[in-house]
């Protein structure tokens, strides 16, 4: 595998995780479900993604942070972050698929309670006539797949990635390459004699 191919795979993995996280954040503010009430008013209560799936925003933010961190971490943390990305994608996907397929009553509980004052699953299910899903749960499933695939790609290619920039390295192997004044200061900071 050439260095150019490795760079493209690295960029693809990081962008997939970032894009999935960004879509998840956007989705948390959009209407996922509409609950129609049968209390005589036929009121339609919109349910945003953050209310329908409470972990949506936190998992999406974690994916964004993880994607950014992947650009600077070392090899061991790449593997750790890849596994975390796979877990984030799987968790986000499972929750989104559940809401898209089932439209469960617990996913509309918060907004319906705010609109009617009723609480408890029995009270809410008694007043909710119908729950309709928008495309956003499906869009978030696609975002979770991006995060998951990005994690798998990192796991498969992390050993070929080049290390981060010089400012992220912690030390230098003695006797390798030319030394400059910054290296001498670094040696002094570690308590080593740069003249030896």
Image (cartoon, helix red, strand yellow):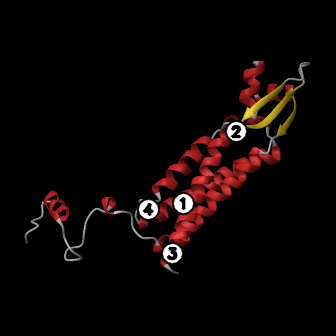
- The residue at which mark 2 appears reads as 49
Q: Position of residue 75 (x, y in %)?
A: 42, 67
State the residue lying farthest toward the bottom.
1
Q: Position of residue 115 (x, y in %)?
A: 76, 21
Q: SS for tag 4?
A: helix
Return the mark for residue 4: 3
Is there any visible trace of residue 155 in the rendered image? no
Residue 128 quadrant: top right
CB within 8 Å, label 3 to label 1:
no
Return the mark for residue 77: 4
- Residue closer to the observer: 9 or 132: 9
Q: Position of residue 114 (x, y in %)?
A: 72, 22
Between discs 1 and 2, the one toward the N terminus: 1
Q: Position of residue 172 (x, y in %)?
A: 25, 69
Between discs 3 and 1, the one toward the N terminus: 3
What is the CA distance from the residue labelled 2 to the residue labelled 3?
Answer: 39 Å
- Residue closer to the observer: 83 or 150: 150
- Residue closer to the observer: 76 or 172: 172
- The residue at which mark 1 appears reads as 14
């Amino acid at each position: 595998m050439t260095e150019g191919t490795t760079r493209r795979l690295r960029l693809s993995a990081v962008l997939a995780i970032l894009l999935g996280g960004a879509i998840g954040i956007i989705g948390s503010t959009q209407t996922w479900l509409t609950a129609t009430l049968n209390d005589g008013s036929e009121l339609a209560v919109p349910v945003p993604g953050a209310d329908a799936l409470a972990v949506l925003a936190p998992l999406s933010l974690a994916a964004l942070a993880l994607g950014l961190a992947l650009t600077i971490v070392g090899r061991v943390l790449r593997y750790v972050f890849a596994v975390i990305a796979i877990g984030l994608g799987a968790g986000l996907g499972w929750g989104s698929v559940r809401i898209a397929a089932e439209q469960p009553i617990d996913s509309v509980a918060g907004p319906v309670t705010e609109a009617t004052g009723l609480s408890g699953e029995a009270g809410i299910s008694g007043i909710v006539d119908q729950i309709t899903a928008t495309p956003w749960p499906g869009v978030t499933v696609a975002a979770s797949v991006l995060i998951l695939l990005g994690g798998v790609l990192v796991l498969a290619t992390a050993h070929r990635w080049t290390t981060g920039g010089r400012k992220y390295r912690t030390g230098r192997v003695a006797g390798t390459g030319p030394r400059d004044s910054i290296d001498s200061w670094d040696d002094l900071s570690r308590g080593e004699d740069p003249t030896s």
